[in-house]
Image (tube, helix red, strand yellow):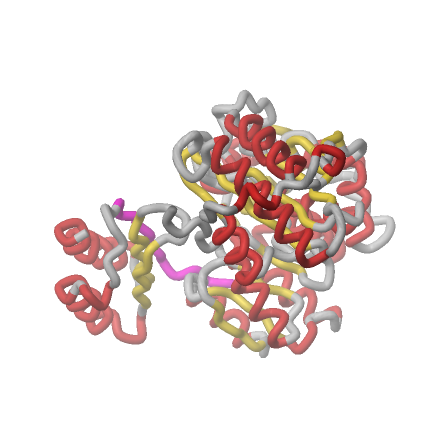
Protein backbone atom coordinates (compact mmCIF):
# COMPACT_ATOMS: atom_id res chain seq x y z
CA UNK A 1 0.00 0.00 0.00
CA UNK A 2 1.24 3.51 -0.84
CA UNK A 3 1.22 6.50 1.49
CA UNK A 4 -2.14 6.62 3.25
CA UNK A 5 -2.21 10.07 4.85
CA UNK A 6 -2.10 13.40 3.05
CA UNK A 7 -1.92 16.87 4.58
CA UNK A 8 -5.40 16.51 6.08
CA UNK A 9 -6.12 12.87 6.85
CA UNK A 10 -6.98 10.30 4.20
CA UNK A 11 -8.82 11.48 1.11
CA UNK A 12 -9.77 10.25 -2.35
CA UNK A 13 -12.62 8.94 -4.53
CA UNK A 14 -15.19 6.99 -2.51
CA UNK A 15 -15.28 3.21 -3.03
CA UNK A 16 -11.79 3.30 -4.55
CA UNK A 17 -8.61 2.49 -2.58
CA UNK A 18 -7.97 3.55 0.09
CA UNK A 19 -11.58 4.60 0.75
CA UNK A 20 -13.09 1.13 0.35
CA UNK A 21 -14.96 -0.79 3.07
CA UNK A 22 -12.11 -3.29 3.32
CA UNK A 23 -9.47 -0.63 3.96
CA UNK A 24 -11.78 1.35 6.25
CA UNK A 25 -12.20 -1.72 8.46
CA UNK A 26 -8.41 -1.99 8.77
CA UNK A 27 -8.10 1.74 9.44
CA UNK A 28 -10.64 1.40 12.25
CA UNK A 29 -8.78 -1.59 13.67
CA UNK A 30 -5.46 0.22 13.44
CA UNK A 31 -6.72 3.33 15.26
CA UNK A 32 -8.24 1.22 18.03
CA UNK A 33 -5.02 -0.77 18.43
CA UNK A 34 -2.88 2.39 18.54
CA UNK A 35 -5.15 3.81 21.23
CA UNK A 36 -5.01 0.55 23.18
CA UNK A 37 -1.22 0.73 23.14
CA UNK A 38 -1.15 4.34 24.38
CA UNK A 39 -4.17 4.45 26.68
CA UNK A 40 -3.90 0.92 28.16
CA UNK A 41 -7.67 0.42 28.14
CA UNK A 42 -10.51 -0.37 25.76
CA UNK A 43 -10.82 2.93 23.89
CA UNK A 44 -13.95 4.98 23.20
CA UNK A 45 -14.05 6.60 19.75
CA UNK A 46 -16.49 9.18 18.34
CA UNK A 47 -17.46 9.17 14.65
CA UNK A 48 -19.12 12.08 12.85
CA UNK A 49 -19.70 12.59 9.14
CA UNK A 50 -20.98 15.03 6.56
CA UNK A 51 -23.91 14.30 4.23
CA UNK A 52 -22.18 12.33 1.43
CA UNK A 53 -23.82 9.11 0.31
CA UNK A 54 -20.60 7.18 0.89
CA UNK A 55 -20.49 8.30 4.53
CA UNK A 56 -22.85 5.50 5.55
CA UNK A 57 -20.60 2.85 3.99
CA UNK A 58 -17.41 4.20 5.56
CA UNK A 59 -19.05 4.82 8.95
CA UNK A 60 -20.22 1.19 9.13
CA UNK A 61 -16.84 -0.17 8.06
CA UNK A 62 -14.84 1.99 10.48
CA UNK A 63 -17.17 1.15 13.36
CA UNK A 64 -16.94 -2.56 12.55
CA UNK A 65 -13.16 -2.46 12.53
CA UNK A 66 -12.93 -0.54 15.80
CA UNK A 67 -15.42 -2.80 17.58
CA UNK A 68 -13.50 -5.86 16.38
CA UNK A 69 -10.41 -4.43 18.07
CA UNK A 70 -12.20 -3.90 21.40
CA UNK A 71 -13.21 -0.24 21.06
CA UNK A 72 -16.61 1.24 21.85
CA UNK A 73 -17.90 3.50 19.07
CA UNK A 74 -20.16 6.53 19.49
CA UNK A 75 -22.00 7.55 16.32
CA UNK A 76 -22.82 11.25 16.10
CA UNK A 77 -24.32 11.17 12.60
CA UNK A 78 -24.14 14.17 10.25
CA UNK A 79 -22.32 16.90 12.16
CA UNK A 80 -19.68 19.56 11.40
CA UNK A 81 -16.01 18.67 11.68
CA UNK A 82 -15.38 21.22 14.49
CA UNK A 83 -18.27 19.70 16.43
CA UNK A 84 -16.42 16.37 16.46
CA UNK A 85 -13.27 18.14 17.70
CA UNK A 86 -15.29 19.64 20.56
CA UNK A 87 -17.37 16.56 21.40
CA UNK A 88 -14.38 14.22 21.54
CA UNK A 89 -13.24 15.92 24.72
CA UNK A 90 -16.75 16.79 25.91
CA UNK A 91 -17.84 13.15 26.12
CA UNK A 92 -14.40 11.98 27.27
CA UNK A 93 -13.65 9.94 24.14
CA UNK A 94 -10.11 8.84 23.37
CA UNK A 95 -10.27 9.98 19.74
CA UNK A 96 -12.64 11.40 17.16
CA UNK A 97 -13.10 10.58 13.49
CA UNK A 98 -14.69 12.75 10.80
CA UNK A 99 -15.80 11.16 7.54
CA UNK A 100 -15.68 14.05 5.07
CA UNK A 101 -13.90 15.42 2.02
CA UNK A 102 -14.66 18.98 3.14
CA UNK A 103 -15.22 21.20 0.07
CA UNK A 104 -14.70 18.40 -2.50
CA UNK A 105 -17.56 16.98 -4.65
CA UNK A 106 -19.74 14.18 -3.28
CA UNK A 107 -17.83 11.48 -5.20
CA UNK A 108 -14.83 12.08 -2.93
CA UNK A 109 -14.63 11.32 0.75
CA UNK A 110 -12.06 11.32 3.51
CA UNK A 111 -11.21 10.25 7.04
CA UNK A 112 -9.78 12.75 9.54
CA UNK A 113 -8.69 12.04 13.10
CA UNK A 114 -8.79 14.11 16.29
CA UNK A 115 -7.02 13.43 19.58
CA UNK A 116 -8.90 13.38 22.89
CA UNK A 117 -7.84 17.03 23.35
CA UNK A 118 -9.59 18.01 20.09
CA UNK A 119 -6.47 18.54 17.97
CA UNK A 120 -5.65 16.86 14.65
CA UNK A 121 -3.87 13.57 15.34
CA UNK A 122 -0.10 14.02 15.34
CA UNK A 123 2.21 12.67 12.64
CA UNK A 124 3.58 9.95 14.94
CA UNK A 125 0.19 8.32 15.53
CA UNK A 126 -0.74 8.70 11.85
CA UNK A 127 2.44 6.82 11.00
CA UNK A 128 1.55 4.06 13.48
CA UNK A 129 -1.89 3.70 11.89
CA UNK A 130 -0.44 3.63 8.38
CA UNK A 131 2.12 0.97 9.30
CA UNK A 132 -0.55 -1.22 10.92
CA UNK A 133 -2.96 -0.98 7.98
CA UNK A 134 -0.23 -2.37 5.74
CA UNK A 135 0.91 -5.06 8.20
CA UNK A 136 0.31 -8.72 7.29
CA UNK A 137 0.47 -9.75 10.99
CA UNK A 138 -2.24 -7.28 11.97
CA UNK A 139 -5.09 -9.83 12.60
CA UNK A 140 -3.05 -11.46 15.40
CA UNK A 141 -3.95 -8.47 17.61
CA UNK A 142 -7.72 -9.13 17.53
CA UNK A 143 -9.11 -9.64 21.05
CA UNK A 144 -11.31 -12.61 22.10
CA UNK A 145 -15.08 -12.47 21.62
CA UNK A 146 -15.82 -11.27 25.16
CA UNK A 147 -13.76 -8.11 24.56
CA UNK A 148 -15.38 -7.01 21.30
CA UNK A 149 -16.65 -3.43 21.51
CA UNK A 150 -20.11 -2.03 20.85
CA UNK A 151 -21.50 0.90 18.89
CA UNK A 152 -24.27 3.28 19.94
CA UNK A 153 -25.74 6.64 18.97
CA UNK A 154 -24.63 9.87 20.61
CA UNK A 155 -27.83 11.50 21.82
CA UNK A 156 -27.99 15.29 21.77
CA UNK A 157 -24.70 15.80 19.89
CA UNK A 158 -25.89 18.89 18.01
CA UNK A 159 -27.42 20.34 21.18
CA UNK A 160 -24.11 20.03 23.05
CA UNK A 161 -22.29 21.72 20.18
CA UNK A 162 -24.79 24.58 20.07
CA UNK A 163 -24.36 25.19 23.81
CA UNK A 164 -20.58 25.26 23.32
CA UNK A 165 -20.89 27.86 20.56
CA UNK A 166 -23.23 30.05 22.60
CA UNK A 167 -20.85 29.98 25.59
CA UNK A 168 -17.77 30.74 23.45
CA UNK A 169 -18.95 34.32 22.88
CA UNK A 170 -20.04 37.11 25.23
CA UNK A 171 -22.98 36.08 27.40
CA UNK A 172 -26.29 37.41 26.23
CA UNK A 173 -25.26 38.02 22.60
CA UNK A 174 -28.50 38.47 20.68
CA UNK A 175 -28.93 38.69 16.94
CA UNK A 176 -32.37 40.21 17.22
CA UNK A 177 -33.03 42.66 14.40
CA UNK A 178 -30.54 41.01 12.00
CA UNK A 179 -31.60 39.33 8.77
CA UNK A 180 -29.09 36.62 7.88
CA UNK A 181 -28.91 34.58 4.67
CA UNK A 182 -27.25 31.19 5.22
CA UNK A 183 -25.88 28.77 2.61
CA UNK A 184 -25.12 25.38 4.17
CA UNK A 185 -23.88 23.73 0.93
CA UNK A 186 -26.26 20.81 1.60
CA UNK A 187 -23.60 19.70 4.05
CA UNK A 188 -23.00 19.12 7.73
CA UNK A 189 -24.31 22.52 8.90
CA UNK A 190 -27.70 22.12 7.17
CA UNK A 191 -29.55 21.84 10.48
CA UNK A 192 -27.33 23.32 13.17
CA UNK A 193 -26.59 26.65 11.46
CA UNK A 194 -30.21 27.79 10.86
CA UNK A 195 -31.34 26.44 14.25
CA UNK A 196 -28.57 28.22 16.17
CA UNK A 197 -29.12 31.57 14.46
CA UNK A 198 -32.88 31.33 15.02
CA UNK A 199 -32.27 30.54 18.70
CA UNK A 200 -30.25 33.75 18.86
CA UNK A 201 -33.30 35.65 17.52
CA UNK A 202 -32.05 36.34 13.99
CA UNK A 203 -34.35 36.27 10.97
CA UNK A 204 -32.82 33.46 8.93
CA UNK A 205 -32.99 32.97 5.14
CA UNK A 206 -31.58 29.45 4.64
CA UNK A 207 -30.58 27.95 1.29
CA UNK A 208 -29.07 24.60 0.35
CA UNK A 209 -30.33 22.81 3.46
CA UNK A 210 -31.77 19.73 1.74
CA UNK A 211 -28.92 17.20 1.44
CA UNK A 212 -29.64 14.11 -0.66
CA UNK A 213 -26.21 12.48 -0.46
CA UNK A 214 -25.05 13.76 -3.85
CA UNK A 215 -25.62 17.53 -3.79
CA UNK A 216 -23.07 18.51 -1.12
CA UNK A 217 -20.99 21.55 -2.26
CA UNK A 218 -22.74 21.50 -5.65
CA UNK A 219 -22.64 25.11 -6.92
CA UNK A 220 -23.13 26.22 -3.34
CA UNK A 221 -21.42 27.06 -0.07
CA UNK A 222 -18.12 28.78 0.55
CA UNK A 223 -16.68 27.84 -2.87
CA UNK A 224 -19.62 29.45 -4.71
CA UNK A 225 -20.74 32.49 -2.66
CA UNK A 226 -22.04 34.53 -5.62
CA UNK A 227 -25.48 32.91 -5.52
CA UNK A 228 -25.78 33.64 -1.82
CA UNK A 229 -24.68 37.21 -2.53
CA UNK A 230 -27.56 37.60 -4.97
CA UNK A 231 -30.01 36.19 -2.41
CA UNK A 232 -28.72 38.44 0.37
CA UNK A 233 -28.90 41.57 -1.76
CA UNK A 234 -32.31 40.78 -3.27
CA UNK A 235 -33.93 39.96 0.08
CA UNK A 236 -32.33 42.77 2.05
CA UNK A 237 -30.16 40.64 4.34
CA UNK A 238 -27.61 42.29 6.63
CA UNK A 239 -25.11 39.52 5.91
CA UNK A 240 -24.79 36.19 4.15
CA UNK A 241 -22.89 33.24 5.63
CA UNK A 242 -21.57 30.48 3.35
CA UNK A 243 -20.17 27.27 4.85
CA UNK A 244 -18.42 24.37 3.17
CA UNK A 245 -19.54 20.75 3.27
CA UNK A 246 -18.06 19.89 6.66
CA UNK A 247 -18.60 23.27 8.29
CA UNK A 248 -15.04 24.32 9.11
CA UNK A 249 -14.89 27.17 6.55
CA UNK A 250 -16.75 30.47 6.37
CA UNK A 251 -17.02 32.97 3.51
CA UNK A 252 -19.38 35.91 4.08
CA UNK A 253 -21.23 38.33 1.79
CA UNK A 254 -22.11 41.87 2.77
CA UNK A 255 -25.41 43.72 2.45
CA UNK A 256 -24.44 44.98 -1.00
CA UNK A 257 -23.59 41.50 -2.30
CA UNK A 258 -19.81 41.88 -1.95
CA UNK A 259 -17.91 38.69 -1.11
CA UNK A 260 -15.88 38.80 2.10
CA UNK A 261 -13.36 35.93 2.13
CA UNK A 262 -11.23 34.59 4.97
CA UNK A 263 -8.49 37.21 4.73
CA UNK A 264 -10.95 40.09 5.19
CA UNK A 265 -12.71 38.30 8.05
CA UNK A 266 -9.34 37.78 9.74
CA UNK A 267 -8.51 41.48 9.27
CA UNK A 268 -11.85 42.55 10.80
CA UNK A 269 -11.46 40.22 13.79
CA UNK A 270 -7.77 41.09 14.33
CA UNK A 271 -8.45 44.82 14.55
CA UNK A 272 -11.46 44.28 16.82
CA UNK A 273 -9.49 41.94 19.10
CA UNK A 274 -6.57 44.36 19.30
CA UNK A 275 -8.88 47.23 20.23
CA UNK A 276 -10.46 45.02 22.89
CA UNK A 277 -7.05 44.04 24.30
CA UNK A 278 -7.50 40.32 23.61
CA UNK A 279 -5.16 39.79 20.63
CA UNK A 280 -2.51 37.84 22.51
CA UNK A 281 1.07 38.73 21.54
CA UNK A 282 -0.42 41.21 19.04
CA UNK A 283 0.10 38.52 16.39
CA UNK A 284 -1.91 36.94 13.55
CA UNK A 285 -0.87 33.79 11.68
CA UNK A 286 -1.83 33.17 8.05
CA UNK A 287 -0.41 31.15 5.17
CA UNK A 288 1.72 32.02 2.17
CA UNK A 289 -1.57 32.15 0.20
CA UNK A 290 -2.90 35.13 2.13
CA UNK A 291 -3.40 38.30 0.11
CA UNK A 292 -0.79 41.06 0.16
CA UNK A 293 -3.61 43.37 1.17
CA UNK A 294 -4.04 41.53 4.47
CA UNK A 295 -0.36 41.91 5.30
CA UNK A 296 -0.55 45.63 4.51
CA UNK A 297 -3.68 45.99 6.66
CA UNK A 298 -2.07 44.26 9.64
CA UNK A 299 1.09 46.36 9.30
CA UNK A 300 -0.97 49.55 9.09
CA UNK A 301 -2.66 48.60 12.36
CA UNK A 302 0.68 47.67 14.00
CA UNK A 303 -0.24 43.99 14.23
CA UNK A 304 2.50 41.38 13.83
CA UNK A 305 2.10 38.85 11.03
CA UNK A 306 3.55 35.33 10.92
CA UNK A 307 3.53 33.02 7.87
CA UNK A 308 2.73 29.30 7.99
CA UNK A 309 2.64 26.62 5.26
CA UNK A 310 -0.72 26.02 3.57
CA UNK A 311 -3.08 23.95 5.71
CA UNK A 312 -5.03 24.71 8.88
CA UNK A 313 -3.01 22.22 10.94
CA UNK A 314 0.17 24.15 10.11
CA UNK A 315 -1.50 27.45 10.95
CA UNK A 316 -2.47 26.07 14.34
CA UNK A 317 1.03 24.70 14.98
CA UNK A 318 2.52 28.12 14.27
CA UNK A 319 -0.13 29.83 16.45
CA UNK A 320 0.75 27.59 19.38
CA UNK A 321 4.46 28.22 18.79
CA UNK A 322 4.16 32.01 18.86
CA UNK A 323 1.27 32.35 21.31
CA UNK A 324 -1.19 33.81 18.78
CA UNK A 325 -4.94 33.38 19.28
CA UNK A 326 -6.06 34.26 15.75
CA UNK A 327 -5.01 32.70 12.47
CA UNK A 328 -6.38 31.22 9.29
CA UNK A 329 -6.59 31.02 5.54
CA UNK A 330 -8.32 33.02 2.82
CA UNK A 331 -10.38 29.91 2.02
CA UNK A 332 -12.30 30.56 5.24
CA UNK A 333 -10.50 28.30 7.72
CA UNK A 334 -10.25 30.63 10.72
CA UNK A 335 -8.95 29.55 14.12
CA UNK A 336 -9.64 31.28 17.42
CA UNK A 337 -7.31 29.17 19.55
CA UNK A 338 -8.55 30.72 22.79
CA UNK A 339 -12.02 29.40 21.95
CA UNK A 340 -11.51 26.17 19.99
CA UNK A 341 -8.85 23.69 18.89
CA UNK A 342 -9.63 23.86 15.18
CA UNK A 343 -11.18 26.02 12.47
CA UNK A 344 -14.93 26.38 12.94
CA UNK A 345 -17.14 28.10 10.36
CA UNK A 346 -20.04 28.66 12.77
CA UNK A 347 -17.78 30.03 15.50
CA UNK A 348 -16.18 32.38 12.95
CA UNK A 349 -19.64 33.49 11.85
CA UNK A 350 -20.75 34.23 15.41
CA UNK A 351 -17.59 36.20 16.09
CA UNK A 352 -18.08 38.26 12.93
CA UNK A 353 -21.72 38.88 13.85
CA UNK A 354 -20.69 39.95 17.35
CA UNK A 355 -18.30 42.53 15.84
CA UNK A 356 -21.12 43.89 13.71
CA UNK A 357 -23.42 44.10 16.74
CA UNK A 358 -20.87 45.69 19.07
CA UNK A 359 -19.66 48.30 16.55
CA UNK A 360 -23.01 48.96 14.90
CA UNK A 361 -21.25 48.89 11.52
CA UNK A 362 -22.37 47.19 8.33
CA UNK A 363 -20.18 44.39 7.02
CA UNK A 364 -19.22 46.40 3.90
CA UNK A 365 -17.81 49.14 6.14
CA UNK A 366 -15.92 46.68 8.33
CA UNK A 367 -14.49 44.91 5.28
CA UNK A 368 -13.19 48.17 3.80
CA UNK A 369 -10.23 48.12 6.23
CA UNK A 370 -8.41 45.89 3.75
CA UNK A 371 -7.57 46.40 0.09
CA UNK A 372 -7.50 43.19 -1.93
CA UNK A 373 -4.91 42.69 -4.65
CA UNK A 374 -6.17 40.74 -7.70
CA UNK A 375 -5.36 37.08 -7.21
CA UNK A 376 -5.85 34.35 -9.81
CA UNK A 377 -5.73 30.68 -8.82
CA UNK A 378 -5.75 27.85 -11.34
CA UNK A 379 -5.60 24.11 -10.73
CA UNK A 380 -3.84 21.94 -13.32
CA UNK A 381 -4.54 18.15 -13.19
CA UNK A 382 -1.31 16.15 -13.11
CA UNK A 383 -0.43 12.53 -13.81
CA UNK A 384 2.26 12.50 -11.14
CA UNK A 385 3.68 15.03 -8.71
CA UNK A 386 7.18 15.51 -10.12
CA UNK A 387 9.28 17.67 -7.75
CA UNK A 388 9.26 21.18 -9.18
CA UNK A 389 13.04 21.45 -8.90
CA UNK A 390 13.21 18.51 -11.35
CA UNK A 391 11.22 20.45 -13.97
CA UNK A 392 13.66 23.18 -15.07
CA UNK A 393 11.42 24.49 -17.88
CA UNK A 394 8.59 25.12 -15.41
CA UNK A 395 10.96 26.58 -12.81
CA UNK A 396 12.35 28.92 -15.48
CA UNK A 397 8.88 30.18 -16.42
CA UNK A 398 8.02 30.79 -12.76
CA UNK A 399 11.26 32.78 -12.32
CA UNK A 400 10.52 34.81 -15.44
CA UNK A 401 7.05 35.78 -14.14
CA UNK A 402 8.47 36.62 -10.71
CA UNK A 403 11.09 38.92 -12.27
CA UNK A 404 8.44 40.69 -14.32
CA UNK A 405 6.14 41.29 -11.32
CA UNK A 406 8.93 42.21 -8.91
CA UNK A 407 7.70 43.63 -5.60
CA UNK A 408 4.29 44.41 -7.12
CA UNK A 409 3.09 40.82 -7.00
CA UNK A 410 3.63 37.24 -5.90
CA UNK A 411 3.77 33.79 -7.47
CA UNK A 412 3.07 30.58 -5.58
CA UNK A 413 3.13 27.18 -7.30
CA UNK A 414 2.59 24.01 -5.29
CA UNK A 415 0.96 20.62 -5.42
CA UNK A 416 -2.30 20.05 -3.59
CA UNK A 417 -1.99 17.87 -0.52
CA UNK A 418 -5.42 16.33 -1.11
CA UNK A 419 -5.89 16.15 -4.91
CA UNK A 420 -3.74 15.25 -7.98
CA UNK A 421 -3.45 18.87 -9.09
CA UNK A 422 -0.83 21.61 -9.31
CA UNK A 423 -2.08 24.87 -7.80
CA UNK A 424 -0.86 28.06 -9.47
CA UNK A 425 -1.52 31.37 -7.71
CA UNK A 426 -0.47 34.78 -9.00
CA UNK A 427 -1.11 38.09 -7.30
CA UNK A 428 -0.60 41.26 -9.34
CA UNK A 429 -1.62 44.94 -9.49
CA UNK A 430 -4.29 44.19 -12.14
CA UNK A 431 -6.49 41.21 -13.03
CA UNK A 432 -5.08 41.18 -16.57
CA UNK A 433 -1.49 40.94 -15.33
CA UNK A 434 -2.39 38.13 -12.92
CA UNK A 435 -4.37 36.25 -15.59
CA UNK A 436 -1.59 36.55 -18.18
CA UNK A 437 1.01 35.28 -15.69
CA UNK A 438 -1.12 32.31 -14.60
CA UNK A 439 -1.81 31.38 -18.22
CA UNK A 440 1.91 31.36 -19.05
CA UNK A 441 2.81 29.15 -16.08
CA UNK A 442 -0.18 26.84 -16.64
CA UNK A 443 0.68 26.31 -20.34
CA UNK A 444 4.21 25.24 -19.38
CA UNK A 445 2.96 22.99 -16.58
CA UNK A 446 0.45 21.22 -18.86
CA UNK A 447 3.21 20.31 -21.32
CA UNK A 448 5.42 18.81 -18.62
CA UNK A 449 3.10 17.33 -15.99
Q: Is residue 395 above or below residue 239?
A: below
Residue 326 place in picture, x, y as percent: 63, 65
In magenta stretch: residue 375: yes
Residue 138 image point, x, y percent: 53, 45
Query: In the current view of this chain or complex, which residue is farthest to the right?
Result: 172
Residue 327, by quadrant, is: bottom right
Q: Can residue 219 be seen from the camera position used here?
A: no
Magenta span:
369-381
**Quarter where residue 411 is shown:** bottom left
Which x, y percent locates residue 336? 67, 60
> Does residue 8 appear left or right of residue 385 in this picture?
right
* Viewer-nearest residue: 143 or 149: 143
Q: Quarter of the image holding residue 180?
A: top right
Residue at the image point whose x is 59% and y is 36% from the top: 62
Is residue 300 found left or right of 411 in the rendered image?
right
From the viewer's perspective, is residue 194 above or below residue 389? above
At x 62%, y 41%, the residue is 142
In terms of depth relative to the viewer, which is nearer, 331 or 389?
A: 389
Amino acid sequence: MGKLFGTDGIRGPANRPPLTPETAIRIGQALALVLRRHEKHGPKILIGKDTRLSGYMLESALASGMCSMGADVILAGPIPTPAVAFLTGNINADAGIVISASHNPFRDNGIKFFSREGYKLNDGKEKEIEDLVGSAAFPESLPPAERIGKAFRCEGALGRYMVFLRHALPAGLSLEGMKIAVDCANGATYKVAPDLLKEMRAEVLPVNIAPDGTNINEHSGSLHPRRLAETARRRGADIGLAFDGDGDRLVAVDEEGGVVTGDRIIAICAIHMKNAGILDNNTVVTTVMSNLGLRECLAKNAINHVNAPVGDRYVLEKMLDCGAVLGGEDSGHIIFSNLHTTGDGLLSALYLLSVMKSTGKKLSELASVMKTYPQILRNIPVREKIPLEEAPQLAGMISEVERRLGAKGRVLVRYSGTEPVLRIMVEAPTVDEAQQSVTQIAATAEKIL
